[in-house]
Image (cartoon, rainbow, N blue to C red):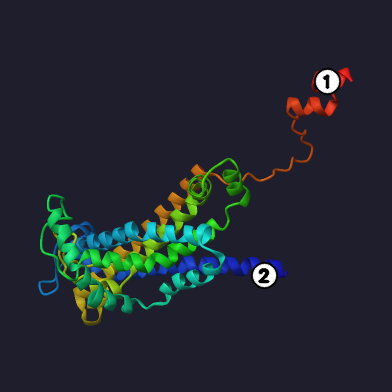
Amino acid sequence: MPDRVLRYGLSALALAILGLIVFFFVRLVGQAQPAFSKFGVVGFVFTNNWNVNAEQFGALPLVVGTLITSGLALLMGVPVAVAAALYLSELCPRVARGALTILLELLAAVPSVVYGLWGIFFLAPKLQPAEQWVADRLSFVPFIGGGVVTIPNYFIAGLILAIMILPIVSAISREVMATVPADHKEASLALGATRWEMIRMAVLPYCRSGIVGGAMLGLGRAIGETIAVTIVIGNAPQLGKHLFGQGYTLAAVIANEFGEATGLHRSALFAAGLVLFVLTLIVNALARLFVIRAGRRTGGPTANVEPEPGAQPLAPPPAAAATATGGGSGGGGGR
């Protein structure tokens, strides 16, 4: 009976979570229906016109801003997080490992508003000359070069998000690296591999699926971030012409405008939340697909498979059979 109660109880909790997700989706669809009825789903998502005063709502600048900032966070944050995990698990001295791990995990305890204020008042002014230098030197590159750098911009928002996802990606990567069998690493070193070659050939291939999963979780965290991005992105509902221009995101527009929204404006914000919800579901589905593919390419330690009842045991290799029967080499017969 206790086993049945535990089984049914856990199943009910799992189904309740799924039911809650379905309930959120249905409520968002219902609240967003007036906006979708007027602009259409395609028109709302792919129209570049978010004007509250004229009651024209097109979410394309918000979707593009969300994808740009999240992509920048992924490009800048994941390599640093994986490198930090490799150092802590493979290279760091044992004396300093605990303290450095705690310091890295403390980044997750910093409130997002603190990241935003630090980014807008300290980081952005310090990086503005370097950003302008990059924009001038890469003026021939579309979207990256050219234009005048503004202090709230896509790049600062992406950099702040990269710092915010560091603890998540690094912690998951470090836990996966801790599961690498010791004999894999010792075998690589015994064959003459250097420490870096051992990491490249034994550790990283084994951890590929876990690292990909951690990166996708970090991407989901970056897509849904609100307060920090609201402070540092500029809150301009328009498509930025270059990387160092102002923009907007789906989460930021909801946080900024929902308190004063009524009527069609309120419905449009619910529609933006529905687009964000669907975008997050797509990211999670892609993350699951990437993890499965990475796991298939990498493979894992082969488990010892017991023969089924009544099955014939596998025949030993010829050399082993010969040794077991005393046939082996001719030396034994000579004796």
According to the picture, the residue beneath numbered tag 2 turns out to be 5
According to the picture, the residue beneath numbered tag 1 turns out to be 331
Please identify the residue farthest to the bottom as the structure is shown.
260
Point out residue 31 in the picture as x, y percentages from the top left corner. 29, 71
Could you tell me which secondary element the residue under label 2 belongs to? helix
Point out residue 187 in the picture as x, y percentages from the top left corner. 61, 44
Q: Residue at x 56, y 65 (%)?
A: 94
Point out residue 89 in the picture as x, y percentages from the top left corner. 52, 60
Left or right, 324 with respect to 37, comes to: right
Q: Quadrant of the C terminus?
A: top right
Point out residue 158 in the picture as x, y percentages from the top left corner. 28, 64
Give the amino acid at mark 1.
Gly
Give the amino acid at mark 2.
Val
Can you see residue 239?
no
**Mark whose residue sits in front, 2 or 1:** 1
Please identify the residue farthest to the right as the structure is shown.
335
> Pointer 1: residues within 10 angstroms few (<14), some, or many (20+)?
few
Can you see residue 101?
yes
Compared to residue 227, the image places residue 42 above or below, namely above
Residue 310 picture quarter = top right
> Pointer 2: residues within 10 angstroms few (<14), some, or many (20+)?
few
Q: Nearer the viewer, residue 159 or 304?
A: 159
Q: Residue at x 62, y 52 (%)?
A: 182
Q: Residue at x 22, y 56 (%)?
A: 42
Residue 265 picture quarter = bottom left
Q: Nearer the viewer, residue 266 or 62?
A: 62
